[in-house]
Amino acid sequence: MVLVDTNGKIVFKENPYLRKNLEDDIDKLLKGETLQDITSNVEEEPEVSNNVDLATAIDEIEKNKKILSVIKSDEKEQERAAKMYRNSCVFVIEANYYINTRKVHLDYTNCRNLEGDEDDV
């Protein structure tokens, strides 16, 4: 998207998501005012992140899938699992794109939920 002031000067040429209120921006430009705070709608990139490489996360998931398939084929493990109130494993890869730095942060979480009697978990 491009915003041009009344003098024909390009004052903004980026993703419209970067602007909080495009209507206000256009009104200001029509009045001859200048735009302030160009990246006002951008989520800041975290200083500390669990940023992981996608290949690393996928490798971890594949390793866990192999372990889980062995567990699922074991009769004793199936009996233990049947006694649990809840047993699940969910792999989550969350991606956040920070438009101001044009970086993607990936967070990988292996969520395991095992509930039951102490001897069965």
Image: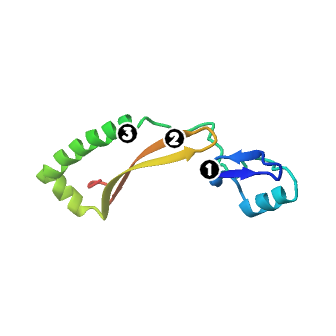
Residue at the limit of the structure toward the right, as seen here: 32
Determine which residue is flagged by label 1: 15
Q: Secondary structure at mark 2?
A: strand
Q: Is residue 104 visible?
A: yes
Task: Tell which circle, 1 or 2, labels the residue nearer the N-terminal end.
Answer: 1
Displayed quadrant of residue 84? bottom left
- What is the spatial separation of the Cα atoms under label 2 and label 3, in whole angstroms? 12 Å
Residue at the limit of the structure toward the front, as seen here: 8
Q: Secondary structure at mark 1?
A: loop
* Three-letter code for the amino acid on which mark 3 is drawn: Ala
Task: Tell which circle, 2 or 3, labels the residue nearer the N-terminal end.
Answer: 3
Which mark lies nearer to you, 1 or 3? 1
- What is the spatial separation of the Cα atoms under label 1 and label 3, in whole angstroms? 29 Å
Residue 15 lies, with reference to residue 105, above or below; the image says below
| Label 1: how many Cα within 10 Å (few below 14, some 14–19, many 20+) | few
Horizontal and vertical percent position of residue 7:
83, 49
* Three-letter code for the amino acid on which mark 1 is drawn: Asn
Horizontal and vertical percent position of residue 13:
67, 46
x 47%, y 42%: residue: 106
Determine which residue is flagged by label 2: 105
- Res 57 label: 3
Q: Is residue 16 left or right of residue 77?
A: right
Which mark lies nearer to you, 1 or 2? 1
- What is the spatial separation of the Cα atoms under label 1 and label 2, in whole angstroms? 19 Å
Horizontal and vertical percent position of residue 52:
45, 36
Task: Tell which circle, 1 or 3, labels the residue nearer the N-terminal end.
Answer: 1
